Amino acid sequence: MKARAHRRFDYQALAEFRYQIRRFMNFSEQAARAAGVEAQQHQALLAIQGLPDAQKATVGVLAERLQIQHHSAVELVDRMELQGLLKRVRSRADRREVLLRVTRHGAELLENLSVPHRTELRSSGRVLLRALETAMRSAGHSTISRRENTRSRRKRRTAKSGIRKK
């Protein structure tokens, strides 16, 4: 009987986490539509601007980041190029490689969308984080990383021994 209750709790934790993700995604989609772009276009701008420095913005990378098929990413980039949100440029290092660049218009749009997203994260982020932590606990994972745990132990030992770190 106890195992059955535990399974129900697992479903509840996972369902709550997915609900909180859907709430944030719904907010994001509505904000994009209100700004006059598709939600996927907003996600593409964010994916390209937010790439790690070592990663090049190509259609293939964009497809991976958005978890869509390559041909769908090509169509998305085509639409975004027509709207003046992106441009394709040849790589200087390898002329065969085509890179994606966010235009000034695209960057302004992304900034305008990012401000309300930051505000929304400030208000709903803790609820989303709590839902994630609950889902992780129910899946048997500790929510405190080993590194954080090690730091805490180190601080306690340092405090007990009276050693001060400079």
Image (cartoon, rainbow, N blue to C red):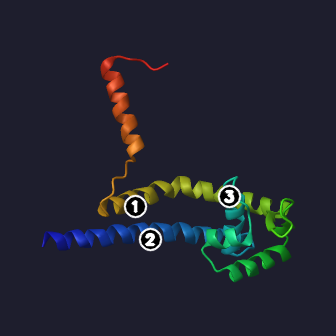
* Mark whose residue sits in front, 1 or 3: 3
Seen at 46% across and 54% down, the residue is: 126
Count up the numbered dots. Answer: 3
Residue that carries the numbered disc 2 in the rendered image: 19
Figure quadrant of residue 38: bottom right
Please state which amino acid type lies under the numbered disc 1.
Ala
Q: Nearer the viewer, residue 139 or 127?
A: 139
- Say which quarter of the image contains residue 136: bottom left
The image's mark for residue 94 is none
Q: Residue at x 34, y 22 (%)?
A: 159
Q: Which residue is mark 3?
A: 51
The relative height of residue 26 versus residue 113 in the rendered view (above or below) is below
In terms of sequence position, does the residue under pointer 3 or pointer 2 come before the other? 2
Mark 2: amino acid: Tyr
**Residue 91 appears in the rendering:** yes
Inter-mark Cα distance, 1 to 3: 27 Å
Residue 132 x %, y %: 41, 60
**What amino acid is found at the position of numbered circle 3 in the picture?**
Leu
Q: Are marks 2 and 1 in contact (CB under 8 Å)?
A: yes
Side of 65 relative to 3 (left or right):
right
Please give the label number shown on residue 131: 1
Q: Earlier in the sequence, mark 1 or mark 3?
A: 3
On screen, 156 above or below 93?
above
First-in-chain label (2 vs 1): 2
